[in-house]
């Protein structure tokens, strides 16, 4: 009798854990990164692509309308003023890559300065051939600084929820501190809670 009761308890425990416990994702497939998908009410890759597309087109339009040399740009620290985690660096990289590939902008790598300075020291130490050694004095100077900020507001009434994002980018002339270009992209997403029935 005790053995039968123990077996029944173990079987019930197994069934409950299989139904209610966390399940691993065991099967997947590739999807189109440009396909709109909203699995939850958070910032996602589609939002990033919408913002990047707007900023890239706007900046290219700005440079096309001016008879100026190829701008040399450096990125400022990204600003996320929302209540959720947003990978601002990924957004910056998306915009930067497209603008470099357009051939209309030059970007400088601010984050690599320390490593480059150490490489100068090594190459000037005598270990590297003199005709190939690189040293200080030839770096480009940035004329413009590009920055961006994302803000958000959330409205929720009953089962209805509206999430609003605003991404603003700007290009500042380092010599004069004049904002020579700015644009923004607004995104509004509507959500509704699903009722749970048994």
Image (cartoon, rainbow, N blue to C red):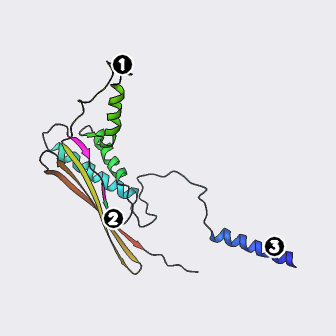
Q: Earlier in the sequence, mark 1 or mark 3?
A: 3
Q: Residue at x 71, y 71 (%)?
A: 15
Residue picked out by circle 1: 129
Question: Can you give x and y, in whole percent of width and height, for residue 17 in the image?
Answer: 67, 70
Secondary structure beneath dot 3 equals: helix
Residue picked out by circle 2: 82
The number of numbered discs placed on residues in the rendered structure image is 3
Residue picked out by circle 3: 7
Q: Earlier in the sequence, mark 1 or mark 2?
A: 2
Q: Are the residues flagged by discs 3 and 2 in contact, CB closer than 8 Å?
A: no
Quarter holding the N terminus is bottom right
Q: Foreground: 60 or 76?
A: 76
* Residue segment shown in magenta: 66-79
Q: Residue at x 30, y 45 (%)?
A: 96
Q: Residue at x 26, y 37 (%)?
A: 103
Question: Can you give x and y, in whole percent of width and height, for residue 145 in the image?
Answer: 22, 47
Is 52 located above or below residue 128 in the figure?
below
Question: Can you give x and y, in whole percent of width and height, for residue 77 in the image?
Answer: 29, 52
Q: Residues within 10 Å of mark 3 (few under 14, many from 20)?
A: few
Is residue 142 shown left or right of residue 48?
Answer: left
Is residue 12 shown left or right of residue 95?
Answer: right
Is residue 101 shown left or right of residue 63?
Answer: right
Disc 1 from disc 3: Cα separation: 77 Å
Q: Are the residues flagged by discs 1 and 2 in contact, CB closer than 8 Å?
A: no
């Amino acid at each position: 009798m005790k053995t039968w009761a123990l077996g029944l308890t173990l079987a019930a425990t197994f069934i409950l854990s299989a139904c209610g416990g966390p399940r691993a994702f065991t099967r997947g497939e590739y999807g189109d990164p440009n396909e709109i998908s909203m699995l939850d009410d958070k910032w996602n890759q589609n939002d990033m692509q919408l913002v990047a597309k707007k900023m890239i087109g706007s900046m290219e339009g700005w440079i096309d309308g001016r008879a100026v040399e190829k701008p040399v740009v450096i990125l400022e620290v990204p600003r996320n003023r929302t209540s959720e985690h947003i990978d601002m660096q990924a957004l910056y990289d998306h915009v930067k890559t497209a603008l470099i590939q357009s051939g209309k902008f030059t970007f400088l790598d601010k984050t690599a300065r320390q490593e480059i300075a150490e490489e100068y020291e090594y190459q000037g130490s005598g270990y590297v051939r003199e005709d190939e050694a690189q040293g200080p004095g030839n770096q480009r100077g940035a004329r413009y600084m590009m920055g961006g900020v994302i803000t958000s507001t959330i409205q929720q009434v009953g089962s209805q929820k509206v999430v609003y994002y605003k991404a603003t980018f700007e290009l500042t002339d380092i010599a004069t501190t004049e904002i020579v270009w700015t644009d923004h992209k607004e995104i509004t997403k509507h959500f509704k809670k699903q009722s749970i029935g048994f």
